[in-house]
Amino acid sequence: MRAKKSFANLWSKQRITKKAHAGRGLETIWEVSTNMNKERNSNGMSRRRFLQTSAEFAASAMFLSLGSAQSFAAPNPSTQENLIPLVTLNNGLQMPRLGLGTMTLNGDVGIRCVADAISLGYRLIDTAMIYGNEVSVGSGIKQSGIKREKLFITSKLWKADMGYEQAKKGFQTSINKLGTDYLDLYLIHRPSGDVKGSWKAMEELYHQGRIKAIGVSNFEPAQLEDLIASNDVKPAINQIETHAFFQEGKSLEYLKQHGVQMEAWAPFAEGRHGLFTSATLATIGKKYNKTIAQVSLRWHYQRGIIAIPRSSQKAHIAENLNIFDFSLEDSDMASISTLDLNTTQFPEWS
Ligand SMILES: NC(=O)c1ccc[n+]([C@@H]2O[C@H](COP(=O)([O-])OP(=O)(O)OC[C@H]3O[C@@H](n4cnc5c(N)ncnc54)[C@H](OP(=O)(O)O)[C@@H]3O)[C@@H](O)[C@H]2O)c1
């Protein structure tokens, strides 16, 4: 009981005592963009084919924004196959670097958004037990008609299900609701309760092949270090709040050093603090004929961070995917780094 409490205390204390760190984002930028000419994506797609696919996609997205939802001509799924570059996680598993977030996308909206996203080329879908939409996500996947093995499905173990026995039950409930017999990624949603017991259960499910990769969410470096030091399987992912106003440069450095892939939740800060009206992001977007949303997502991508933007609108879901045909220059990345407030935009969750 005592250990549990001190773990939770550590979590909230670290969140509260973060200090401002003006202009420190620049040194964390990964040089993905400058390698674009040399790049093949992880599926071996050449740059030329990749750009061609992106152009086909862009044309579809443009058509979508001009017409009604009914007039959208769904791209041929075979040409969308490798639209999104992959990253190789620390256990060798390949994961798309952009996906659809589904928090609040419930019921029929959830079904539609997931099916739309998959038809547009998304393969990574992020859900969680606590979102209450795993059944909808599963229905959307079914409706898309795509083979299960083509998708990368993430779900998360909620606080109420922490502990060895409960975690196994929580996992089983999630996959039953999703209508699948395995998860690509299963995350501990928050570092509270019996983290070690839960991780042991997740390690067993991982060794049985029922989860392809296991990871965490909302873990501070010290909490992650503790988990890494006392267990066999290293977390593949840490999914944390990251956006222009909370850039988490130090966490990014730390995770890179430890071979743990960083994933951004709320990549748009849910539009808080005026993200969608930011003059800095708008000016950069103008240069490339891209929207603020696209500039934001390209910025995550060039930092080497997986992003899972959520949208309930097909036009936005399409727009958010159209980020692979341009590169932000170093000066753009430097401008965006000045937006960092180094503080959460979601104090109610801390
Ligand atoms: N692990 C965790 O603790 C945790 C916490 C929070 C979230 N998450 C995950 O991260 C995902 C993303 O975070 P989030 O849902 O909090 O917020 P977000 O993706 O930062 O922002 C979502 C908001 O952005 C708007 N939007 C999306 N695309 C847009 C575009 N192209 N132009 C203008 N507006 C656009 C959406 O409105 P429209 O619907 O109108 O497009 C929505 O209001 C979640 O859905 C969830 O899967 C995880």
Image (cartoon, rainbow, N blue to C red):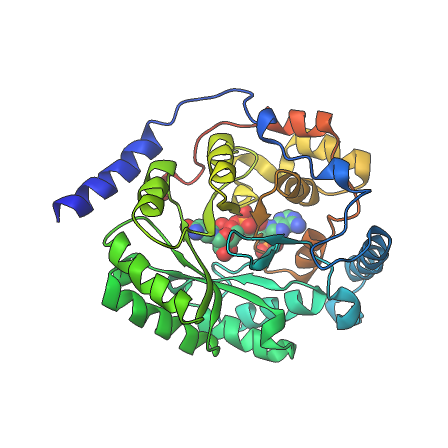
Q: Is residue 204 left or right of residue 285?
A: left
Residue 147 on image: x %, y %: 63, 77
Q: Is residue 312 left or right of residue 4?
A: right
Residue 242 on image: x %, y %: 51, 40
User: Residue visible at 63% across and 71% down?
Assistant: 150
User: Residue visible at 52% across and 42% down?
Assistant: 269
Q: Point out the residue furthest to the front here.
A: 232
Q: Is residue 51 above or below residue 22?
A: below
Q: Is residue 298 left or right of residue 36?
A: left
Q: Is residue 350 above or below residue 108?
A: above
Residue 298 on image: x %, y %: 68, 42
On-image quarter of the C terminus: top left
Q: Quadrant of residue 96?
A: bottom right
Q: Point out the residue furthest to the top here.
A: 22
Q: Is residue 75 visible?
A: no
Q: Quadrant of residue 43?
A: bottom right
Q: Is residue 66 above or below residue 35?
A: below
Q: Quadrant of residue 156?
A: bottom left
Front residue of 78/67: it is 78
Residue 28 on image: x %, y %: 58, 30
User: Residue visible at 47% across and 28% down?
Assistant: 342
Q: Is residue 10 visible?
A: yes
User: Residue visible at 79% across and 47% down?
Assistant: 325
Q: Is residue 252 left or right of residue 316?
A: left
